[in-house]
Image: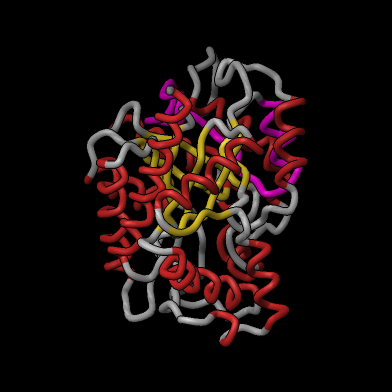
Amino acid sequence: MTRYSILDLSPITEGGSAAQSLANSLALARHAEAHGFTRFWLAEHHNMPGIASAATSLVIQHVLQGTERIRVGSGGIMLPNHSPLLIAEQFGTLATLYPGRVDLGLGRAPGTDGSTAYALRRNQNMADNFPRDVVELMGLLGDAVPGQPVRAVPGTGTHVPVYILGSSLFGAELAAQLGLPYAFASHFAPAALDQAREIYRSHFQPSAACEKPYFILAVNAFGAESAEAAIRLKSSMQLAFARLRTGQPGPLPRPVDDIAAVLDPAILRMVNQALSVAVHGPVAQVETELRALIERHRPDEIMFNGNIHDQDSRRQSFAIAAEAMERIAAGVAA
């Protein structure tokens, strides 16, 4: 059975607040736990009026404390913003408090604009050190080596599972060389999906962390009682993405009845292409669309994303996605 999980950006909605968004994230994680999702990941973004998960390790702890079984982690931590030692200590502490439940997904982008990246790390070339920093971080989370001058306490010996995230061929190649699981950001940057997937699988080198390739496909989910209702729910994410790409980021907008009447046609085409790896509608339609994605990409896991303004509708959307995955599993088993 293909596993299924959730990526949550802890969206701040129009008319809402960061406090409400963080409460919504915990409620969604509990909902995911009840519906059989494997993991619940949160993403690091900075200086974003519509995202409340900037202090990602703190939000992960918030969700871990309020759930019982589901794995919780980062999708991802933007490593160029941090020293490997600091992340090893943070996630080593989380793994010590919640053993067997913590994941560490790592990204190479700053997760923000240039000015904010400078405010975070002050060095614009840190992304160039990403492969070296990943290896250093894994070493800090691994077993201690005699004479090792610096250790993460807690952290050493926790072996927190590391995942590489990416939207380009760079991440696919790095994950393959290091023998790590790889999650592709097809939920907003699908252009290189096919090539990255094949590079990762064909170049994969088995490691102590992963004996064979483990590929995670990110999919936007807009489940609803009807196809029309799903299209309306999706409009919030379309508007938010358009505003972000045109330099006007803000809270997650309320949905609209006709997105074509709101966005310029060229902008709408760009948005729809970026968000094209998606499933929509009632459970039967979502199941059909998921079957096609699974047949094409053969993922080991699907990471569902879906920024929906109304939280009840958002929880229902993920419940529909979970039901569709269960139906697919039952069909395969039969």
Q: Write down the region rendered in magenta.
A: 151-178
Q: Quadrant of residue 172?
A: top right
Q: Is residue 2 left or right of residue 189?
A: left
- Of residue 171 and residue 304, the one placed in the foreground of this image is 304
Residue at the image point whose x is 54% and y is 25% from the top: 149
Question: Does the image show residue 90?
Answer: no
Looking at the image, what colour scheme do you see? secondary structure
Query: Is 138 within the magenta?
Result: no
Q: List x then y, in percent, for residue 58.
A: 35, 51
Q: Is residue 19 left or right of residue 271?
A: left
Residue at the image point whose x is 44% and y is 73% from the top: 252
- Of residue 89 and residue 236, the one placed in the foreground of this image is 236
Q: List x then y, in percent, for residue 250.
A: 49, 77
Q: How many marks?
A: 0
- Of residue 110 and residue 42, the one placed in the foreground of this image is 42
Residue ranking furthest to the bottom: 261
Question: Does the image show residue 135?
Answer: yes
Q: Is residue 124 left or right of residue 19?
A: right
Residue at the image point whose x is 73% and y is 40% from the top: 196
Q: Is residue 67 left or right of residue 212?
A: left
Q: Quadrant of residue 238?
A: bottom right
Q: List x then y, in percent, for residue 91.
A: 41, 37
Residue at the image point whose x is 64% and y is 54% from the top: 109
Q: List x then y, in percent, for residue 168.
A: 73, 47
Q: Is residue 207 above or below residue 11?
A: above
Q: Is residue 303 above or below residue 114?
A: above
Q: Quadrant of the C terminus?
A: top left
Q: Is residue 296 above or below residue 211?
A: below
